[in-house]
Amino acid sequence: MHHLLAAILAILVLGISKHHVTAFLNNRQLGSSQKSSTASLSDASQLIAETNVISNEDQDINNNNNKQQYSPLLSAQDIQKISSGGVAIIPNWLPPNLLSKMSYLFNNGQFQPDGLTNTARKRDEQGFTVKADRQTFRGGAGWDSPVGNTAIRAEFANLMKQLRIQLAGELDRPSLAIDGEYKHEVTYNWYEVGAKLGRHLDEHHEETKGTK
Amino acid sequence: MYLIYVHILCTRCVLMLIVISTYYRGWMMPTRRSVTWLVYLNDGWQEEEGGALRCFPRSDGDRKSNNVQVGCHEGNLQVGWVNDSIPVFLDVFRESGGAALYQLVSSTEGSDTSPNERQILSVQDFTVPGQPIDFSVFLKDEVKDKFEQISTSRLDPRFATASTTSAAGNITPTHDTDCSDERTILDIPPIGGTLVVFDSVSLPHLVREVTGKRQRLAATGWFHEDSQFAIEM
């Protein structure tokens, strides 16, 4: 809270612009992901910051794609399951050519491990080991990194976009369809032999996050 | 002169409170996770290789639903269930300034339309406490026994606290990593090409230990939707 008070005081007393304060808060948010007790928020901000899903050029293409009509990728039964708290499972959903080519990065040793055992603590305090935890591809670059097969990743990203647009309409969550700088995380992850991940939720109510 | 100075300070304090109440209520990020998806990439994965995604769903069990969509209602996120299958939402933007827990019911008894009327389940509006949170203490007596909280970030064993850190500094989560005592369990083997999709707010899940001789590979992600009352400057 004292950060917020300081920001407000800066506006009133020093006349700092909105832009500066917004930047300050954004930096505070990203910084806090390393140390706060925020659950999925820190997880999310970390991945969002480190995984640029869509480049500006891609975004122009995607904005045009927004106007297109896609064939549904999920059945009505799948949508009903998601809507009512269940799980939609579709075997053999990914085209075989994509399945084989998307493992390119991993098979060529391009993945860089990332510790995500416990985002409530600093990375060096997480007790992270590759034999015990999920690892995530970021490698200092994002999903649109020149590393590996960018064409395959773009093809996959387009497929997931079709899925997202269908969900936006059929789950009546219209803002799912919107593209933006901080939306729609995507990543590779992998587990070494012996690794696992404890019970968790991917998103929480804001009021139940972090220390008060 | 001193009085003028005090007056100016008080005015600034009032202005600060107005600005804080105007700009600093809501979510810290403009978007939030809405739908989780996973696409598995291991060709020919066998069940004995482990690494199954273990989910604890509602609709896959033998339960009656009231046809209310899970996860979120008018920006208020779900924090629990009543009667095993009816979502309970948390509204922290009440006119009182406090919070309330509610479920959705049909405005007309016997109606086939989806429930759209809020039925408050908490005794009175309250302030959400610090972690760990137990929402059941705010519920009416007749609901308490029927309520099940999904999770909170601190109840989530993934986020071990200092008390679960060993003397050597290693995190030692105290939870059962299989959660085999939960009533509804759905294990999904990570077979290459399979797509898995679920609501990000309402479905607890874990990944079981990889027991085979190769790494478990996946592409995963979260589709975001707009947050409720995102902080604006």
Image: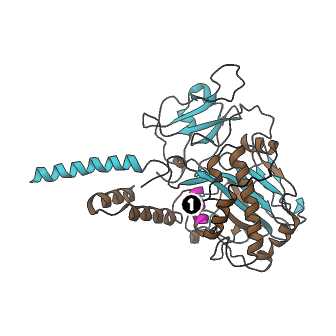
Chain colours: A brown, B cyan
Image coordinates for residue A199, horizontal then vertical, percent: 69, 53
* Residue name at image x 15 percent, y 53 percent: B5
Amino acid at pointer 1:
Ser
Q: Quadrant of the N terminus of chain A?
A: bottom left
Q: Secondary structure at mark 1?
A: helix
**Residue B176 seen in render:** no
In this figure, which residue is indicated by the disc labeled 1?
A42
Image coordinates for residue A131, horizontal then vertical, percent: 73, 71
Picture quadrant where residue B53 is located? bottom right
Q: Specify whether residue A12 is painted magenta.
A: no
- The residue lying furthest to the left in this view is B1
Q: Nearer the viewer, residue B206 or A7?
A: A7
Q: How many marks?
A: 1
Chain letter of the residue carrying label 1: A
Q: Is residue B51 above or below residue A74?
A: below
* Residue name at image x 42 percent, y 64 percent: A24
Left or right of residue B228, residue A146 in this image: right
**Residue B55 seen in render:** yes
Q: Nearer the viewer, residue B194 or A120?
A: B194
Left or right of residue B143, residue A100 in this image: right
- The residue segment tinted magenta is A32-48
Tag 1: Cα neighbours inside 10 Å, few (<14), some, or many (≥20)?
many
Q: Is residue A68 above or below residue B99?
A: below
* Residue name at image x 49 percent, y 40 percent: B92
Q: Specify whether residue A45 is painted magenta.
A: yes
* Residue name at image x 34 percent, y 60 percent: A6
Q: Nearer the viewer, residue A67 or B85?
A: A67
Image coordinates for residue A106, horizontal then vertical, percent: 77, 75
